[in-house]
Amino acid sequence: MNAVSDLQRLIGADAVLAPADGLERYERGYRYGTGRALAVARPATTADVRAVVRYCYTHDVRIVPQGANTGLVAAGTPDPSGDQLILSLERLRAIEAVNAGDRTARVQAGTRLSALNQHLAANQLFFPIDLGADPSIGGMIASNTGGSRLLRYGDVQRNLLGLEVVLADADATVLSDMKALRKDNSGIDLKQLSVGSGGTFGIITAAQLEVHRLPAQTATALLVPACQAAIPQLLSRLEAEAGEFLAAFEGMSANAVEAAFLHNPRIRNPFGQGAVPAYTVLVELASVLGPDRIDLSEFLGERLGAYLEAEDPLITDGLLGRSEDLWAIRHSISDGVKSLGRIIAFDISVQRTQLPALRAELLRLVSETWPFLRVCDFGHCGDGGDHFNIVWPADAGTAYDSGAVEALRERVYDTVVKQFHGSFSAEHGVGPYNAGFYERYTSTEERAFAGKLKRLCDPKGILGNIQFG
Amino acid sequence: MNAVSDLQRLIGADAVLAPADGLERYERGYRYGTGRALAVARPATTADVRAVVRYCYTHDVRIVPQGANTGLVAAGTPDPSGDQLILSLERLRAIEAVNAGDRTARVQAGTRLSALNQHLAANQLFFPIDLGADPSIGGMIASNTGGSRLLRYGDVQRNLLGLEVVLADADATVLSDMKALRKDNSGIDLKQLSVGSGGTFGIITAAQLEVHRLPAQTATALLVPACQAAIPQLLSRLEAEAGEFLAAFEGMSANAVEAAFLHNPRIRNPFGQGAVPAYTVLVELASVLGPDRIDLSEFLGERLGAYLEAEDPLITDGLLGRSEDLWAIRHSISDGVKSLGRIIAFDISVQRTQLPALRAELLRLVSETWPFLRVCDFGHCGDGGDHFNIVWPADAGTAYDSGAVEALRERVYDTVVKQFHGSFSAEHGVGPYNAGFYERYTSTEERAFAGKLKRLCDPKGILGNIQFG
């Protein structure tokens, strides 16, 4: 068997790249995961995806499906063996239909989020999952991304109306439910098996999405909570008072904000020279109604005034700003933190009212045990998510120690999962980066059941680089 | 084996009812399904549910899980054999926790929707799935109910944060994910297997729900669309203009409205004496903001004026009314139609822009083939759902003919599914009433896969009265 030439005969010479072609951009993950691929297959149709799967099934070739390769848990990159075939969906990128009256979009899995949103804007529509990266839609489904506006629009699962998936069985069975119905309970909702499963249950080839009206106006502000305990109270107040307009409620630690400023010198510090609050909440209101109907900036400004002037104020400072300017801070954190040293990343979540207590406990844990580390966390206070990212500074005085890092990861995750009943992977999914923790925290019953499901979809275990179960 | 005495020993004498105790209220479905039960087990704890399942597994006793027995496809009632044990969840009805800051509620599966909402109201919260019946939460999950406000709040699936399920395997395995996290992608989302599967994959015993703020105001109006094609346009206009306030967009045929008036003489005809429009749309706006901030009645009234006075008007009449009065019409339809004769019910859906064309085709089909039947349809124009209910009038002059009814059902469903790519069960799920159509319209691949899933959860096929696959 020569997989490259065999696959080239099946789906076309230009559709298969061999190691000699230079595969590094497929082999290296955005944050983790650098391996070596057997080859890269780039099918242009679902029929070609099936042909590749059938070949791999017959010849026991392992397949790693890959979208835009923006995943953060190494689920889309090969291991170092050189035995895994990357099945890239990048050529399946047609936006097949947009139905403005239904607010639905039918897309192939390799479609980039940015391309979809650019296309939808002509109809005043968008797919509202807001992320720093520019993933493929298939990848977003495989990791069920949430992002910054989950509070308002939900995650991918809540906006998924249909799916086409190719299983890794002998027939490369296609499960397809692309009717784009909002109400359909006429059988088992098989598409749910692919949501958030990191591409290990089947290869997602196309989807039907619910899309939303673009807002006509937004109002954005930075709020400095009086204390950590005030944050959930502030959220409840805004939900009660600003209600259906509330679109984002994001938290940023001082270290995270300072990293953003250092990285992106064009960002003005809205709090003035030098002063960065210990913690800042970014609030966004948005509406399809115009400001002639209700002026959201005026509304939000008035709310900030009330919170500041209360007898027992929930905030100590609050300022409205241009939406782009304030989001630029939030969106510069990730790269800013990256530039400070080596990152130890955590994508964790708890019940949202528990977030202040969790942060306090984790900050205490890190500063007591590894005082030279710099915690630069930021996250989604509205839904209990926190990107508890820690930097091992280049100037730490202590060389990076992977043993210490593993001990730290275990301590942090144990605190989140065992003490606070939270999740060790809120929105990045499970991949080789955190598969050990899947085993650590998932019940025997659940793992056994997931393993059986996996074998239904992929009897030989050739798909993906984690197996569940 | 004497199942009654055996089960009484296991879970208590008062927890098991024998046929001599009178089981009719468990045996007779709300609309379809009258059978005979072996007995009714009423466990009060998850441990007792497991004990019942283990016994039934060992002794090959079939189990039909039942919530509030309000289902409409006979999935919760036994067959006529007298061999099936009803496992009623009615005693598992504790509202275990409400967390107002998180907007979550932890409930046992037998909790009634009305009881939950009464409890939540103290915190200005509610579970926003709006239905005519008063089902149990477990039953709502098993049939993934949608209801009248799906447009705004989504279906049960979109508001389900966690689930506890007992499988029908030898160990009565419990799959539990009750952490109530909004973001958690740390494994396979096993709870999705139970959503909408009619209780055949496992027995739902408890759930974590996302709940919502009660609106501070609503504004409700009846609109008479200028023609059927104007309905999707009206919906798009309202989504663009009333945006996040839009909570319901329901359609009612003249026959359905007249049936409501006949049934409930306290309802005033808001259109004046005798005149019932051919089709009426009920629109509701709702907000947690008070009228001092934005007056929704004024707003909606203004919109109606604009739609009426446009050069090519979308509506020919529009009137604001008291919310309770207008919803009373909508909510009296079901019983009103029932009192006209024997009902042939269809719970169908298509893409929402296709609804006018589907209705036209179905009305033509019925009036050409069975002119004596009376179509009294009403439904959810906002999400493409239609309760295309047909009455065989008591005074038809032709006796009810079940052969003709079966032929009609097939013609109607074929039109929906084959011609319009819709669903034969939008929100009522699959049960003995429509299991034949599940087989007719579900692909071989999907049925085979569903059958394999079913065997994972229920290896002996003892659970539920349809098998999928």
Image (cartoon, coloured by chain):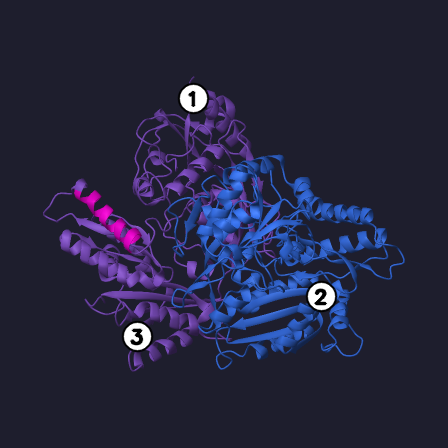
Chain colours: A blue, B purple
Q: Is residue A436 left or right of residue B438?
A: right
Identity, as a three-letter code, of the amino acid under mark 3: Leu
Identity, as a three-letter code, of the amino acid under mark 2: Asp
Tell me the mark number nearer the camera, choosing from 3 and 2. Answer: 2
Asked if B230 appears above or below A397 in the picture, the reply is below
Nearer to me, B98 or A168: A168
- On the image, which quarter does residue B46 sit in? top right
Task: Find disc 3 in the rendering and name its residue.
Answer: B314
Tell me the number on the disc at residue A335.
2
Task: Find disc 1 in the rendering and name its residue.
Answer: B3
Asked if A16 appears above or below A115 in the picture, the reply is above
Nearer-N-terminus badge (3/1)? 1
Q: Give the total of numbered labels.
A: 3
Task: Name the element at disc 2.
Answer: helix
Q: Is residue B316 left or right of residue B120?
A: left
Identity, as a three-letter code, of the amino acid under mark 1: Ala
Judge whether residue A438 can be spotted in this image.
yes
Tell me the number on the disc at residue A243.
none
What range of the chain is rendered magenta? Answer: B404-419
Q: Residue at x 76, y 52 (%)?
A: A361
Residue A379: x %, y % from top left:
67, 61
Task: Name the element at disc 3.
Answer: loop
Dominant secondary structure (helix, strand or loop) of the stretch shown in magenta: helix
Residue B38: x %, y % from top left:
37, 26
**Distance between the alpha carbons at the discs numbered 3 and 1:** 63 Å
Asked if A67 appears above or below B445 in the picture, the reply is below
Queried whether the magenta region covers residue B405, the answer comes back as: yes
User: Which chain letter matches label 1?
Assistant: B
Residue A112: x %, y % from top left:
54, 63
Nearer to me, A406 or A43: A43
Q: Residue at x 33, y 77 (%)?
A: B307
